[in-house]
Amino acid sequence: NKVLAVLAVSSVAMMGLSACGGDAGTESTKVLKVAFNQNASHPQAVAITELSDKLKEATDGAFELELFPDEQLGSQAETLELVQSGAVDMAIVAGPLLEAFNPDFSVLNLPYVYDSPEHQMSVLNDPEITGELFDSLETSESISIVGAYHGGVRNVYTGAPVETPEDLAGQKIRIISSDTNVAMLGMMGGVGTPMPQGDVYTAIQSGVLDGAENNELIYADLAHAEIAKHYSYTKHLMIPDYFVANPTVMAAFSDEQREALETLFAESVDSELASFDSKVSEAKAKAEAAGATFHEADVEAFREAVTPLHEDKVNNDVTKAIFEKIDAAR
Ligand code: GCU
């Protein structure tokens, strides 16, 4: 088992470190393992690495973070389970996965709900808006949410340009697993097919899928651009990527250390967002070099098609209150 092997190797490495002492002040450093499903140059990976350095300094060497990129510890759903059991300390997971534990999270994953990445981040990291929802997973599910990163704007890619929902008729499009996403892709005209990110390339290549929906980074970095050459700007979704931790890990932080983590995390959210656009430009150039083309789509037609989903999912006091606050934050 690849995951256990990685975990075993890293704990041996840690034992080695504490056995030989190391630099003064690092002897008792707790190295928190962070599972990540994308590559080490992704803006979130860079943000976590910076956060680790600053956290180590702010806590006088008590904590640092060690990133395991490229699905080394498993798919996002698998790493979420490892965080819940405590086998892995932390992970970055896409918002739709949390709907399985509390369907109210759906309100933060709806298509066309945010005007801009800045709007999205101001909503997600405002404890007045999301605090109670985030806390809801702590005791019952053993998931602490430290906060949320921007994860790009998602668009559709297949073997042909997509301009309107009619163009997606009969097309199997990979989505991140959630009821909301299945319903959304259906309303967009296609057939939503849940699958872990790492399986998508082979599935498109073998014809199991006709395409997928994601940001430009994934499209280029996972070489999807080679096998689904038309990327169409439906701009339907901005999903949160949550930085989650096992609650026992968080309990090891003193109040002061926790405060430092929160402040530094907020800084890392800003720097991640600031670097996203240039990564998108790089990714587009890379995808074009691989033979891909980018197209405008009829965004209004897609927006209209998915509107009923807002009514379906904003269906109780919790989601209504959050939805109103999202609106007010525009
Ligand atoms: C985005 C998102 C990831 C997610 C991925 C996916 O890249 O940032 O968290 O895993 O999409 O589609 O699976």
Image (tube, grey):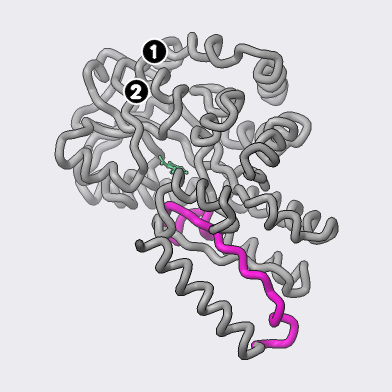
Quick one: label 2, few (<14), some, or many (20+) residues within 10 Å?
many
Look at 70% across and 49% down and name the residue there: 266
Ligand 1 sits in quadrant:
top left
Q: Is residue 198 above or below residue 107?
A: below
Q: Secondary structure at mark 1?
A: helix
Give the label on residue 297, or none.
2
Q: Is residue 32 magenta?
A: yes
Give the label on residue 108, or none.
none
Q: Amino acid at mark 2?
A: Ala
Q: CA distance from mark 1 to mark 2?
A: 9 Å
Q: Is residue 46 above or below residue 245?
A: below
Q: Is residue 104 magenta?
A: no
- Decide if residue 58 is in sight here: yes
Q: Which residue is mark 1?
A: 301
Q: In the figure, is residue 83 to the left or right of 28?
A: left
Does the beta carbon of the residue at mark 2 sit less than 8 Å from ligand 1? no
Q: Secondary structure at mark 2?
A: loop
**Outermost residue, left direction?**
206
Question: Where residue 275 appears, x then y in whole percent?
Answer: 54, 52
Look at 34% across and 37% down and name the residue there: 195
Question: Where residue 14 appears, x then y in whole percent?
Answer: 57, 77
> Do the numbered discs 1 and 2 sit on residues whose CB atoms are within 8 Å?
yes
Question: Where residue 220 appears, x then y in whole percent?
Answer: 32, 48
